[in-house]
Image (cartoon, rainbow, N blue to C red):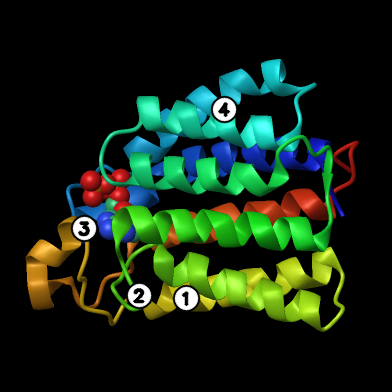
Amino acid sequence: MVTQAQILKWLQTFADEIEQHKDYLTELDAAIGDADHGINMDRGFKKVNTQLPSLADKDIGSILKTVSMTLISSVGGASGPLYGTWFLRASTPVTGKQELTEQDLLNLLQAGLDGVLQRGKAQLGDKTMVDVLSPAVVAFGQAVGEGKSTLEALHLVVVAAEQGMQETTPMLAKKGRASYLGARSIGHQDPGATSACLMLKCLLDSTSSNDLGI
Ligand code: ADP
Ligand code: MG
């Protein structure tokens, strides 16, 4: 089970982690893009962070929908609309909910991925955030099917996400700015895959902590 308080904690933790990894994400984007991924994400999630107090009494679906609108309106580049779509679509199956069962969380992760796939048209192996978000959903679904707890399942999600992130390094980029580089995109870790991995790690971290943050 994941509570509304843990979802708020997740967003706050992710905003903090993005701020801490802002330069790293931008460096990754400097190698195969236009050196703004950390800047883009930090702009969006700083804004999300300031909105969190006003979301304290909202349901999880409304919270995720607000995050989506904030990202779409404040983040440029490919990542704004793509993360915005992930949060918008992720919000739909959890509309009105104050806590999430494992099935709810699976639906959330699957809907977010489906949104990114539809919006960005990237496939697995194209060297994008999809290479993290997709194996993460598979890992969660498998773990839930095997009767694992939310925490155990999220541990496996993080393992799959880290592997997916690392596997983007030898890939040839086929979508986004990095694809303009052709073979020169090989040998660099994808920035969007890196931020997506961070997002899932934060979900595990905030689910591991109780409502008091202990
Ligand atoms: P931009 O590329 O417009 O400067 P960012 O630098 O913020 O935007 O984000 C780049 C990241 O966006 C890439 O590392 C990649 O993971 C992701 N991305 C780009 N295009 C797509 C796409 N079509 N589908 C999924 N993810 C994509
Ligand atoms: Mg960029």
Work out whether mark 4 precedes mark 2 in sequence or the reverse, and give the earlier one: 4
Work out whether mark 3 precedes mark 4 in sequence or the reverse, and give the earlier one: 4
Work out whether mark 3 precedes mark 1 in sequence or the reverse, and give the earlier one: 1
Q: Secondary structure at mark 2?
A: loop
Mark 4 sits on what residue?
Answer: 66
Work out whether mark 1 precedes mark 4 in sequence or the reverse, and give the earlier one: 4
Q: Secondary structure at mark 4?
A: helix
Q: Taking 89 as reference, is 157 above or below it?
A: below
Query: Image quadrant of residue 28?
Result: bottom left
Determine whether, in the image, residue 171 is placed left or right of residue 155: left
Q: Amino acid at mark 1?
A: Gly
Q: Amino acid at mark 2?
A: Thr
Between the residue at mark 1 and the residue at mark 4, the CA separation in whole angstroms equals 28 Å
Image quarter hosting the N terminus: bottom right
Mark 1 sits on what residue?
Answer: 164
Q: Percent from the top left, x then y, of residue 10?
A: 68, 43
Q: Taking 79 as reference, is 142 above or below it?
A: below
Between the residue at mark 4 and the residue at mark 2, the CA separation in whole angstroms equals 30 Å
Q: Taking 110 as reference, is 147 above or below it?
A: below
Cβ of disc 3 within 8 Å of ligand 1? yes
Residue 176: assigned label: 3
Image quarter hosting the C terminus: top right
Between the residue at mark 3 and the residue at mark 4, the CA separation in whole angstroms equals 26 Å
Query: Image quadrant of residue 210?
Result: top right
